[in-house]
Amino acid sequence: MSDTPPEGTPRADGPPTGEDEGHTLAYGHSLRHPATRGGRNRSDAAAAEGPPGPEGQKGGSRPDRGGRTALERKFARLGWGFALPGLLVVLAVTLFPIAFSVAMSLSNVDVSAGGFRLSGFTTGHYGLLLGSERWRYAVLFTVLYTIGTVLAELVLGTLIALVLERLGGAGRSWMMALLLLPWAMITVVSAQLWAYMYNGVYGILTSASENLTGEPVQFLGTRFPAIISMAVADIWKTTPFVAIIVLAGLMMLPKDVTEAARVDGADAWTAFWRVRLPLLRPALTIAVLFRILQAFGIFDLPFVLTGGGPGNATESLALLGWQVMFTNLDFGPGAAVAASTAALVLVGCLLFLRAFRSQVGEEEAGT
């Protein structure tokens, strides 16, 4: 019996009998590649071009120094292109007024019948603020008011969110709809509503206090009751916002973590304080930051409810800046009040974020 294979059968040491040297088999691999231009064969040229990237491209899709491929860089440029119109709007309506206020606060402002004109450079407006007892009280009032209302809203909002989490079904939907009513109401309208209830003559709260104590309480007539009354109106309106954000955070928490804590013997309070609350910190951070920004720049509520009174008891920084600039027509000091308010808000938010990150870093290092 002959050892020679039949004609046309492929052999391990060469191409099949009767085939050309460049013949390609049915599965697509050539046994002998013809030479390419420049004296290199195809395998050498492919090796010189480099390995294909993740997207199937050769050489050109190699990651850059940041680790991004060409396709990722293309999508990043596309994203910036889509975001550019919104960024321009933010630049026009937010950053430009702040920059113009800073420029006005550092300039001599000449007011005339035709408008105002900026000339020269001065820091006297800020010196005037630092020496003003009214400005110092406005700063103290705004800071304490922000801290008190944000803490109250955070506690009440978290409690409401825990109750809504337990309800479920149609009950949760109805309660969420009721909660959104104060938040959806315009602040001017809600402030006017509370002004009617606080009215010293026909207010329902004044009448109720007289029936309970035998003497009507003037909620907006003296310093301390006016501050508390304004804080109550603010907390009533903005607590639903915190509750919705905390509820969203609670719904995203993994159930197995709480179940594991219960299996380990933790009661409801321990499971919430030790397990669920640390996981809620991202949602709580968002709520606190939004509320700091809103509470520190509060204007419409004291403007409608108290007008900053009695005296200047409820005068916030925003209300003080409006009165100085548009009532007294002192544009330089008014711009200095606005610039100082923006600076204080920025410093407060940065300090809060730094404290939050350091606390999270210490916990991660401890674990």
Image: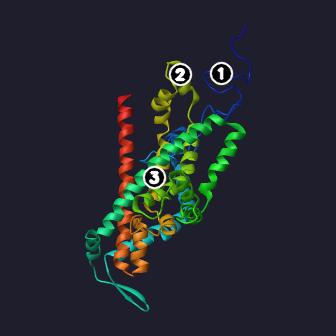
Residue at which label 2 appears: 262
Whether residue 286 is visible to the viewer of this picture, yes or no, is no
Give the residue type that dot 3 points to.
Thr
| Marks 2 and 1, the one that precedes in the sequence | 1
Q: Earlier in the sequence, mark 2 or mark 3?
A: 3
Question: Is residue 145 shown above or below 51?
Answer: below
Q: In this view, does 351 lie above or below 282?
A: below
Residue type indicated by callout 1: Arg
- Residue 149 has which mark? 3
The local crowd at label 2, few if under 14, some if 14 to 19, many if 20 or more residues have their Cα within 10 Å, is some
Q: How is the image coloured?
A: rainbow
Residue type of the residue flagged with mark 2: Arg
Which residue is found at the position 39% from the left and 73% from the top?
Answer: 101
**In front: 126, or 319?**
319
Residue 247 left/right relative to 226: right
**Front-lying residue, 173 or 193:** 193
Which callout, 2 or 1, points to the residue nearer the camera? 2
Alpha carbon of mark 2 to alpha carbon of mark 1: how far? 70 Å
Q: Name the residue under label 1.
A: 11
Residue 228 sits in quarter? bottom left
Q: What element carries label 2?
A: helix
Q: What element carries label 3?
A: helix
User: Which quadrant of the figure has residue 338?
Assistant: bottom left
Residue 309 - label:
none
In this view, 28 is above or below 242:
above
Give the SS element for disc 1: loop
Residue at 70% over, 25% down = 17
